[in-house]
Amino acid sequence: MNYLRLAMAQINPVVGDLEGNKKKILHYLRLAKDKRADFVTFPELCVCGYPPEDLLLNSSFVEDNVKILQQIQETIDSSVVCVGFADKGDDCKVYNAAALLRQGKLKGTYRKIHLPNYGVFDEKRHFYPGTYCCLLELGPIVAGITICEDIWYPEVIQQLSRQGAHLIFNISASPHHEGKGRLRERMIKELAKENHVFLAYTNLVGGQDELVFDGQSLVVDAEGNLLARGKSFEEELLIIDLAINDLIHAQQFSHEYQAKKSKAKHYPLQRISLPFSPKEEQNPILFYKPPRLSPLAEVYGALVLGVRDYVQKNGFHKVAIGLSGGIDSALVAVLAVDALGQENVVGVIMPSQFSSSETQEDARHLADNLKIKHLNLSIDGLYQGYVKTLEEVFENYKPDVTEENLQARIRGNLLMALSNKFGWLVLTTGNKSETSVGYCTLYGDTAGGFAVIKDVPKTLVYHLVRYLNKKAGYDLIPQSIIDRAPSAELAPDQKDQDMLPPYPLLDAILKRYVEKDESFSQIVAAGYEPGIVKKVITMVDRNEYKRRQSPPGIKITPRAFGKDRRMPITNRYWRNNIHSR
Amino acid sequence: MNYLRLAMAQINPVVGDLEGNKKKILHYLRLAKDKRADFVTFPELCVCGYPPEDLLLNSSFVEDNVKILQQIQETIDSSVVCVGFADKGDDCKVYNAAALLRQGKLKGTYRKIHLPNYGVFDEKRHFYPGTYCCLLELGPIVAGITICEDIWYPEVIQQLSRQGAHLIFNISASPHHEGKGRLRERMIKELAKENHVFLAYTNLVGGQDELVFDGQSLVVDAEGNLLARGKSFEEELLIIDLAINDLIHAQQFSHEYQAKKSKAKHYPLQRISLPFSPKEEQNPILFYKPPRLSPLAEVYGALVLGVRDYVQKNGFHKVAIGLSGGIDSALVAVLAVDALGQENVVGVIMPSQFSSSETQEDARHLADNLKIKHLNLSIDGLYQGYVKTLEEVFENYKPDVTEENLQARIRGNLLMALSNKFGWLVLTTGNKSETSVGYCTLYGDTAGGFAVIKDVPKTLVYHLVRYLNKKAGYDLIPQSIIDRAPSAELAPDQKDQDMLPPYPLLDAILKRYVEKDESFSQIVAAGYEPGIVKKVITMVDRNEYKRRQSPPGIKITPRAFGKDRRMPITNRYWRNNIHSR
């Protein structure tokens, strides 16, 4: 039997690191050559990293990335290589493009037609849309070339299929959120089946600021059967052999396809023809499907990769974490150890007069379980210092949230001093529930370089911690941390639930308001108590200013704070719309 | 003579404050009625405020703004009213639209065709583009309706002119930067002249987070002569009478126009006809042109309005400012007094062992000149407290930037404690030069609600201060503050210039790199020393993380930090591109 051997390189480039990305691409090209691959794919914009954002406005950035592409091109011999880069047209317009390379030459370029401009995406800010479809005739095989968003609209694939494509390549940089991998796989299977084409989808891997790309590249046959799936959150060269007969048959036996052929074309077509003699293969690789991660393992994997890449790509090695003895800092500490190794994580315990002996004991216990170094710095003296400094100005005023915030800010200062002195990156420990309602101290517990779990709701924090303990086979995170009622310990006998609705209720309302854009009336109509909904929505809207000054953190839900949700700070809608009801 | 009386309401709405904006619009409608206006215009999206950003994704927000428009509509009788709102199509798509209202009815809707998606704008994220041009036949007068960006492209105006428009209305929300008013006026004059049409341009006024809208509405005749200009940075109802004969004549006598008429149309046309009998006017208002502000007065006006609106629209009354005795905090204090009144500004002097008696004296002197309350809080004890707390951990390490940052962070904490206790908003005092190169302490001098001069380069700070002293007629800002070499006073004998190039040189390089997107090579080719350029660019890129966590501040240059410049934090381009050279 004759086969086309695909090698799909799901790689982890660094934004702006043109030289580094080139080296990585050349490394994978060598691996693909060792495997005698006929066709090698790399993800969307992997020459410059994704998303390069406004670097694309810098006059030399796009030119430099084109030069790097040329250097890659020069090394290529008989295999066909498809690699994502930022293309500069003769009109100086910039396009999100796929280069088709062979024998040291650029054989063709496809420019992405559908540019996403919603959610975290700003592609209409940075790119002009492509205007033509692209078919590659590779000997007897006809392949369509597409980039990411192109396959989320039907017309490009329909046209490529109608014009004779047996196989569609898609190179992607698709950011992860919980369940996205499953969603993508279902969509790609349906698309292949509906259009009677094979589909080979190459996705990026890695963390870039708030985004994590999960890999999970896919190859699906024309009946929607999964042939191959790449690993989650890991670089990999995924190899699969596609039988030439299967590829060609798919289209020939589709009556529906023949009927469709007459329909209108959306885009002009660019046709690239390259000679190709399929090789006979004695031991073809026909299936490759590493097991899917469970939903909790997937979230955890995204968080580990996100924190590792943020820390290391920004040139840090070690991190410091304030350990309160609470569940959030416990989760962040475990994550950091898994991401960076125990030797690169320092726990800092900063007790005050309001810290119970139990929480301090739990913090030490956790540090021991994780085998991480920990420091103990009491904040009592400093707190008294602030009280004394402000004594006269605050005369006749009772203690209130001011004094609570002072404690959090002293802790922030101590962590930042350690960061400045030793070059440790500070990881903050606020979860999405707190971040949403502003139950945190700006410049206090929000002080740090990376907010690891800022998109993880408190209820999910509990699930993850139980998952980790189960995985560890023992109480890696002490059970007392899980059982204790959450408290900021900034005032006597304080509990989160004095100020906030119970977390399961809070998280349910937040999911509707923040992630699904439901209105007050819609949430109330779904059965939630109007007083509580009003309180929650008001807190979310009023605390936009805190989120604006908080560190970046990993997106794991369909709608994170940050680029994903661009709300004005000056915003009277909450007042106008809810307070009057 | 018969006239069309225009009333152009350049108003200052609040984003999301639908009820408040309605009241304001109704107030100006009453004023326009008192003036017997035939046609009343309001700015782009003034029903919901501009820019509403992702509020537009909230299912009820657009519907509520349509309801408010209907309530406005019901109050309108014989005059024609053009008002900007967010329109929801039957297909649930949202459009940036202008409603044409008369006698309690919606007579027509124009939907913005050109959606800006660059710089601070995200309109392709939030709106679908309109697909038709709109002509209003008002008795003998033919008027085209356009929205903001539409007039920055030639084809809409060309088509409207060719199809018979005598007059083009444009309702806008055009953010200010230095020189924008002049640029806009020149462009509008040319546009009117080229297309033989009168142009009536109504712009928004007010501060919204980082943006300031400057008003300066314009009326220009068909020869490009300025007939009226609204005030800068102030709400106003601008009234002007346009002679019917002049309007109609403009087109009839244009041979060029007749020749153009045959050319292709770009968009389908919606035509709305309303009866109108021009009134005879004995004392027409033919000219209205308040004097233009000088360039420095314009920047100062933008800053004053920006800080006033941010403070007041967010529900604050008083502000606190750390007074160092330096020129930046001096400028911010004067700005705050002009924006909010001396009774609403508190200066906080926080000396350390490194503060000279001269700077402390200057800070007090300034507070006295401004007649503002000031507090004096020494940070020495607290600083010693931190040193002691960290003594053991820092053993064998020499003092470095850690200890400098601690001082700045203690000051940040004290200011935030005052904010928490008394409800004062903290204004930070960092200028654009510092912000660009990260010469500031995160959670220290960057701690606060609003970074008033974050887009004002240091050299412009000096110009503004000299302008203010000249305007005051005496040394409102003590001359010694202007004369002293800038210093953070965080270490003995420290001067900014020990770390940074001289400010005129630094600002020149920053303008090229940040505002003009010039590359290292381009800047060097312009004659700057490669070593200095490399140092500056490296500092700018490495400090993106600090800017990301800094408070919002007023955009006054063509490219501010914030929504205007969206750079990745994880970015190795600087290292890759510059360090290797």
Image (spheres, coloured by chain):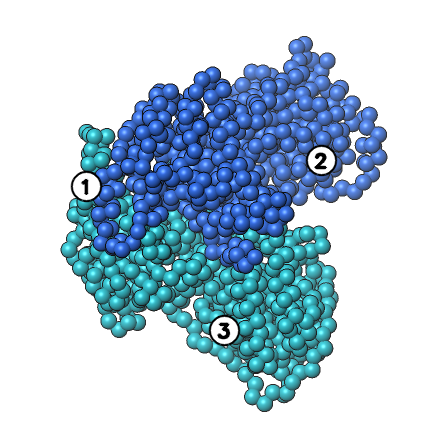
Chain colours: A cyan, B blue
Q: Identify the residue position indicated by label 2 in the image.
A: B157
Callout 3: helix, strand or loop? Answer: strand
Is mark 2 in CB contact (under 8 Å) with mark 3? no
Q: For the residues carrying marks 2 and 3, which lies nearer the camera in this image?
A: 3
Q: Identify the residue position indicated by label 1 in the image.
A: A384
Q: Quick one: label 3, few (<14), some, or many (20+) residues within 10 Å?
A: many
Name the residue nearer the viewer: B108 or B346.
Answer: B346
Residue at 27% across / 55% down in the picture?
A: B396
- Determine whether, in the image, residue A500 is placed left or right of residue B4: left
Q: Earlier in the sequence, mark 1 or mark 3?
A: 3
Cα–Cα span, label 1 and label 3: 55 Å
Q: Quick one: label 2, few (<14), some, or many (20+) residues within 10 Å?
A: many
Q: Are marks 1 and 2 on the same chain?
A: no
Query: Which chain does tag 3 point to?
Result: A
Q: Is residue A64 visible?
A: yes
- Under mark 1, the amino acid is Gln
Vertical position of residue A526 compared to residue B171: above or below: below
